[in-house]
Image (cartoon, grey):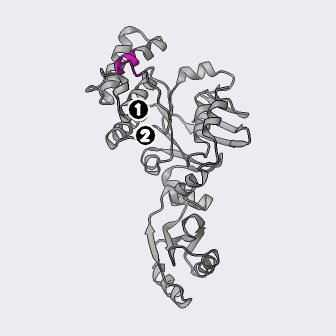
Amino acid sequence: MNYIQVKNLSKSYSDIDALKDLSMDIDSGILFGILGPNGAGKSTLIKILATLVEPDSGEVFINNINLIKNPRKIRELIGYVAQDIALDKILTGRELLDFQSDLYHMKKKEKYERIKLLINQLEMNDWIDRKCGTYSGGMKRRIDLAAGLLHLPKVLILDEPTVGLDIESRNIIWQLLKDLKNDGMTIILSSHYLDEIDKLADSLVIIDDGKVIAQGTPAQLKNKLGGDRITLKVREFSTQEESKKICEILSSIDGISQIIINKAQGYSINFVVEKEKDLLTKLKVELAFSKFEIFSLAQSQPSLDDVYLQATGKTLLDAEISMTGKRDLKKESKQSMR
């Protein structure tokens, strides 16, 4: 059952198209991942789902409620944890949660029981009564997450919740998300961490340049690649012409497919080899015959980064580097608040 339906969303900021006719469906009671590099449109999509930004066109339905026409009803269903954390430095963590629960009009007994449970689940007992201004990044993130969960939302929306966190805080948050999903909560997790989405998500979309380029379970997307991924270099920094010649050699070998030249990685060549075939020995012979020496050769099982590479011709890291300086995120943030 599609609990959340996103249909043909588009959103622009001045001359930047953040989302381009984006569509996706999310089932009830799953952890749904949104993966992509910074600047791909993830945060814009998350803010639309959280009713903080209106799209230029398109529709969103949560539990058959039109999000754009009925934002107040949607806010009763969702909890939102933003990428940027803003806490009152004067209040203690407990005081902040108490204040937040009053905003939800929670009954006194209910709110104290809920606060106590979240303090235990997020392992905050040792420091919950200290002022928020003294908290580390991991502590702040846990308090922020607890605030978003006070009212037991049907849908929890998280925008890069573990960026910059220590391993302990990250693991605590991961475990809580697993527990919440097992209790029936629908969770939407935006991240550019491959391992986070791979380990937690039941289903996901990969977004690039404001568009969905892949959708499915992590296993489905990786299995589509068909075999192990090989990264080949004949020198540290090859030329485009040299890489094209090597691609011709690879294309002549039966069992090698999905050949990509990765310009950002010194014109390295990525390709897939069929399972249960000893193709690397034959490859080495063919390269030697054409007077190419192997500088490096790495073999790995398919990953979500390989899925992204196959769709775009670049890795997630390469995409993030290429986006640096292309988008004015402060300007977009100001425009989204209008």
Judge left or right: residue 228 versus residue 54. Answer: left
Q: Is residue 324 visible?
A: yes
Residue name at image x 34 percent, y 22 percent: 131
Confirm or deny contact between disc 2 and disc 1 (CB under 8 A).
Answer: yes
Q: CA distance from mark 2 to mark 1?
A: 8 Å
The residue stretch that appears in magenta: 89-98
**Disc 2 marks which amino acid?**
Thr
Judge left or right: residue 86 versus residue 69. Answer: left
Judge left or right: residue 121 versus residue 266. Answer: left
Quadrant of residue 99 in the image?
top left
Residue name at image x 30 percent, y 28 percent: 124
Residue toward you, 306 or 321: 321
**Percent position of residue 166, x then y:** 35, 42
Q: Is residue 81 magenta?
A: no
Quadrant of residue 3 in the image?
top right
Q: Is residue 276 visible?
A: no
Decide whether the magenta segment is chiefly helix, strand or loop: helix
Residue that numbered label 2 is attached to: 162
**Percent position of residue 76, x then y:** 54, 20
Q: Which SS class for mark 2? A: loop
Residue toward you, 47 or 201: 47
Q: Residue furthest left?
A: 126
**Disc 1 marks which amino acid?**
Arg
**Which corner quadrant holds the C terminus?**
top right
Residue 90 vs 24, above or below: the answer is above
How crowded is the residue under tag 1: few (<14 C-alpha within 10 Å), some, or many (20+)? Answer: many
Residue name at image x 73 percent, y 33 percent: 56
**Percent position of residue 122, x then y:** 33, 30
Q: Decide which of tag 2 and tag 1 comes sooner along the chain.
A: 1
Residue 249's tag is none
Residue 141's tag is 1
